[in-house]
Amino acid sequence: MGRRGPRAQDSKRYYDWLYKAEEDLHSARLLKSEEICQLCAAFHCQQCIEKALKAYILYQTNILHDGHNLTWLCKQAVKLDREFTEWLDESADLNRYYIETRYPTDIPVEIHEAEVERAYRMARTMYDFILDQLGEEMEEE
């Protein structure tokens, strides 16, 4: 379970979470080139890492954590593998795209192409790292 507990319909299979993470990364790649979709692309970068971290933790512990805070999820991964420490800054950066990108605000949020490209690179690199960590763990079994 997690802080509040997962929703009953959420998959308990780590590979389902990885598949959805890959979908989000692919969506971000497609959307980032369209100016009107910059906020959506940033959101999908955040979602990719949220789901990939949940997949890693689920694989390691058989516990599906609830929540969307990437820094908290990354700290849970650090408890399992200290190498995740290197991703704490990136998780904090990507965390910003969870709320601000999805809802209208009185002061419009602007994200420029360079910022979305940076978010995409962070998500891509962190996703690849998580895949590598999972690959190493699965090979040891």
Image (cartoon, grey):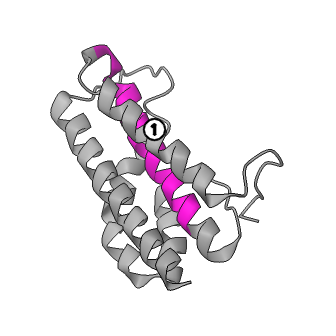
Q: Magenta segment: does it hold 62?
A: no
Quarter of the view holding residue 5: bottom right
Q: Position of residue 110 (x, y in %)?
A: 28, 25
The residue at the far left in this view is: 114
Task: Quadrant for the C terminus, please.
Answer: bottom right
Would residue 107 be found to the left or right of residue 65 on screen? left
Front one among 58 and 132? 132
What kind of element bears circle 1?
Answer: helix
**Residue at 50% over, 36% down:** 99
When the figure is inspected, residue 133 is found, relative to residue 25, above or below; the finding is below
Q: Which residue is mark 1?
A: 24
Would residue 8 be found to the left or right of residue 14 on screen? right
Q: Position of residue 123 (x, y in %)?
A: 33, 50
Q: Position of residue 70 (x, y in %)?
A: 48, 57
**Residue at 51% over, 24% down:** 103
**Residue at 39% over, 40% down:** 25
The residue at the far top in this view is: 36
Q: Magenta segment: does it hold 38?
A: yes
Would residue 17 be found to the left or right of residue 135 on screen? right
- What type is the residue that disc 1 sits on? Asp
Disc 1: CA contacts within 10 A as few (<14), some (14-19) or many (>=20): many
Task: Quadrant for the N terminus, please.
Answer: bottom right
When the figure is inspected, residue 37 is found, relative to residue 116, above or below; the finding is above
**Residue at 36% over, 21% down:** 108
Q: Position of residue 66 (x, y in %)?
A: 68, 56
The stretch of residues the image draws in magenta is 36-56
